[in-house]
Amino acid sequence: MARPVIVPTGVERFFGEDEIIVSKTDPRGVIVYANKIFLDIAGFSEKEVIGQPHNMVRHPATPSSIFKLMWDRIQAGHEVFAYVCNMAKNGDHYWVLAHITPSFGADGTILGYHSNRRVPDARSFPEIKDLYTRLLAEEESAGSPKTRISAGLSFIDRMLDQRGVSYDRFIHSL
């Protein structure tokens, strides 16, 4: 059964600086756990999210290349930090600073992923929003979805090269 299309409302939601949104997924990104803060901010019940792909809260304001970058890093066994705009069930949005880590089995295989999301520092928003606007334009100017993601990743690489920093250093400098 296809999930309903959620239309962004343009309304921003907020959560407290002392609150942490937590979710866990299997290796394919299917939600196996979501805490109450996740459910409250996203407006879903536990029954609605368990067993669903985590991208059910994906907002179009976050470029596809950012998600590709995150997936590449965690599937390679590395943690990743990223600013993400998520979408609630009714189309409202909320910004998070996501910290995603793989969970490993005794044999070293990835069993799933654990994500903590915190309130991002508001001082980082101008730079992140500007970067994401430029990334979305870069992706949109490319052809197919695969080409769009590659164009976005190339843009990120060029930006980091110009600044002379790694992705991690860039994110932690904001």
Image: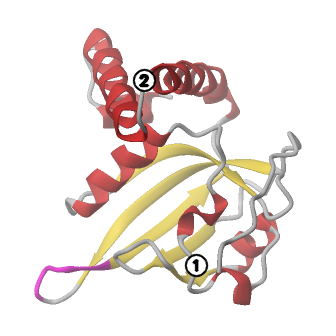
Instruction: Find the distance from the CA under tag 2 to the CA under tag 1.
Output: 30 Å
In the image, 41: left or right of 133?
Answer: right
In the image, 91: left or right of 28?
Answer: right
Q: What is the secondary structure assignment of the residue under circle 1?
A: loop
In the image, 43: left or right of 32?
Answer: right
Q: Amino acid at mark 1?
A: Gln
- Residue that label 2 marks: 142
Q: What is the secondary structure assignment of the residue under circle 2?
A: loop
> Dividing the image into 4 quarters, which one contains the N terminus?
bottom right
Q: Amino acid at mark 2?
A: Ala
**Which disc is residue 24 wearing?**
none
| Residue extent of the magenta highlight | 107-111
Whether residue 107 is situated above or below residue 126 in the rendered picture:
below
User: In the rendered image, which quarter is residue 102 located in?
Assistant: bottom left
| Residue shown at 51% from the left, 28% from the top | 174
- N-terminal of the two: label 2 or label 1? 1
Q: How is the image coloured?
A: secondary structure
| Residue shown at 75% from the left, 67% from the top | 4
- Residue that label 1 marks: 52
Q: Is residue 98 magenta?
A: no
Whether residue 107 is situated above or below residue 110 in the rendered picture:
below
Magenta span: chief secondary structure: loop
Q: Residues within 10 Å of mark 2 (few under 14, many from 20)?
A: some
Whether residue 49 is situated above or below residue 129 in the rendered picture:
below
